[in-house]
Image (cartoon, rainbow, N blue to C red):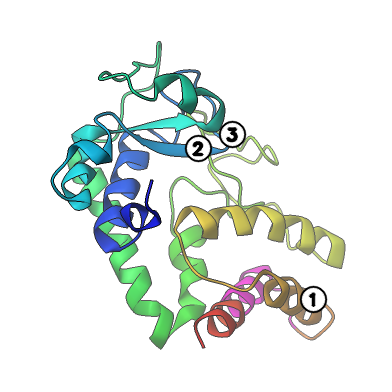
Amino acid sequence: MARGAYSGEEWTAARRAALARDNRRCQDCGAEEDLHVHHIKPVREFDTQSDAHYVENLVVLCKYCHGKWEGRDERPRLAEAEPGLLVREVVSELVTDTVDRLMLEKIPEVLYDRVVWFSPNICRNCHARFTNSPRCPGCGVEDGRKKKETFSIQGAIDRTHTLIDRLKERDIPFDEDVLYDTVRDLKTSGLRANDREVFRQAVGESVHASVQ
């Protein structure tokens, strides 16, 4: 498949919409890691590649299930799956992604608040993604509330691992090395007791480094 079929804003928007609709789960086995967005009708069968990128022609599969659905003109239906997002929720997520892209050049420091702090699906304490339970699967807090500030550098680094996953889900460009280094530096400075500001500044610095 030509690499060009999977680049550009049209493909990026369609991919995000499919992931939102399918709750970021493989629609065959239910896995939540190593996800691909599969074209039910192959791209090669369309007059132009972009014509293949309508959401109804897409389904989320993990990398292990993807192969067995190649060439089949049908989509799996995940048994006992939670209801998918409503159309208005998909649109809201796409609008948020557009706002995120506009922030990259202007004020990338606020991306942390956008991606984590004000998201109802992300834990403020450890940055894990919630499932269908009010208790965080990563650290056990209720409703994503913070337990306490992380005074140790290692604790902040551990939370940076999951923060990286959240940034990648949003397709936000950032420099991992800069993110880790900035978190480490800030936790040894006067900001060591303010996790939110540490991560806000670290995300901003890492995005700046990536887009320059």
* Label 3 secondary element: loop
Q: Which residue is mark 3?
A: 135
Q: Is residue 169 magenta?
A: no
**Residue found 77% across the figure and 63% down from its top:** 156
Q: Nearer the viewer, residue 86 or 53?
A: 53
Whole-percent x, y for residue 188 in the image: 85, 80
Prevailing secondary structure of the magenta residues: helix
Quick check: 21 left or right of 50?
Answer: right
Question: Residue under circle 1?
Answer: 187
Residue on which the image places disc 2: 35
Instruction: State which tag comes first along the sequence, 1 or 2.
Output: 2
Q: CA distance from mark 1 to mark 2?
A: 33 Å
Looking at numbered disc 3 in the image, what kind of residue is underneath it? Arg
Q: Are marks 3 and 1 in contact (CB under 8 Å)?
A: no
Which segment is the magenta one?
191-203
* Closer to viewer: mark 3 or mark 1: 1
Are the two marked residues, 3 and 2, in contact with CB atoms closer than 8 angstroms?
Answer: no
Q: Residue furthest top?
A: 79
- Please state, as top left, top right, bottom left or bottom right, where the N terminus lies in the image: top left
